[in-house]
Image: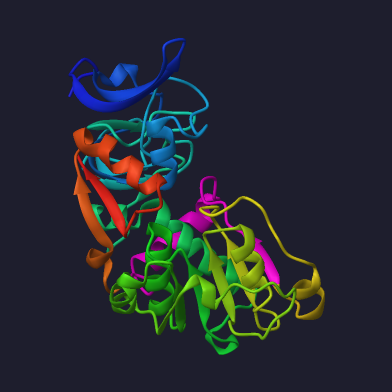
Amino acid sequence: MTDQNPFRAFRIHSDVSGHRAGIESMTVDTLSPGEIVIKTAYSSVNYKDALAGTGQGKILRTFPLNGGIDVAGHVVASSDPKFREGDAVLCTGCGLSETRDGGYSEIARLESKWAIALPDGLSLRESMILGTAGFTAALALYRMQQNGQSPELGPIAVNGATGGVGSLATAIFARAGYLVHAISGKAEHGDYLRELGASAVLGRDAVLTNKPMDTARFGGALDNVGGPMLGALLAQIAPYGNVASCGLAGSPTLEATVMPFIIRGVSLLGIASAGTARDIREAVWSHLASDWKPAALERICTREASLEELPEVFPPMLAGASFGRTIVKL
């Protein structure tokens, strides 16, 4: 293709006329700079994408930009010898739809330092069912195990379990040999969570506690919610277990005391996936393509949308009605 061949992209603007987003025609030379041009096969929809696409969150740091913090496709041009035409690659985070054009585009241009060769064991579609959500969940497991987490410490609590990160975390931790206790306010999805590998499904009220220290019920936890739920989990973690914090769907506050830290040696680990170092990024994706690959990955993909359908996908996600993962087929 040439730099002047047109293609479609979901582009986000914010200026004196306000926020607006929709399908536009673009050419390669109008994309953010980078060493690799890819023909996009798939992207995905994450909470940050919904915030950016609707203007309800300050995600983009410059305007206009194409939305989509995830992208996967085949290289059509490269000035970096490490990547050749036809190579399958993926990229999650790393400034996409924040400081540079993202994956909601039929053609994308990437910085080669952030592009990851698609590992054996994953298709492009599977890589985007995982996307930032799956990478975040797996990065949490990676960091928890670095800090001594093991199945012997006890079950892993996963809250927000029917969302993208929660669904994938349930499946990934189960695949890695942990008992998973999935926590969700959506009791009607209990069978779904068990299909993903949860050994128990708990309602939120069964986990919330006002005690600074409570009975140690869990060996560790992955928290997508924040606020009172995060504090409750910390109070119920076994000695030397880890809580990985990766979301704020409920609240950005931390309501806890230091008692779990100084009495039980509990660790609170922050999970920031967007700028993860390349060596760790490659190690996590290698796990996701092999020993941590969810057995029910396609079950987690509950919707496949087009660029045109994105505006109807965002509001339910922001309202807390999201279920599983939505991928975008280009």
User: Is 88 in front, or is 62?
Assistant: 62
Q: Quadrant of residue 293?
A: bottom left
Q: Which residue occupies the foreground of this view, 235 or 294?
A: 235
Q: Is residue 308 visible?
A: yes
Q: Is residue 6 left or right of residue 218?
A: left
Query: What color scheme is it?
Result: rainbow
Using the image, determine if residue 178 lies above or below residue 287: below
Residue 203 pos. (x, y %): 46, 74
157 vs 277: above or below: below
For image coordinates 53% across by 73% down, the residue present is: 205
Q: Is residue 276 magenta?
A: yes
Position of the C terminus by quadrant:
top left
Question: Which residue is depicted at the point 63% across and 63% down?
Answer: 228
Q: Does residue 123 appear in this view?
A: no
Indicate left or right for 321 with 308 as reference: right
Magenta region = 267-294
Instruction: Residue 242: give x, y in percent of width and height.
Output: 63, 73
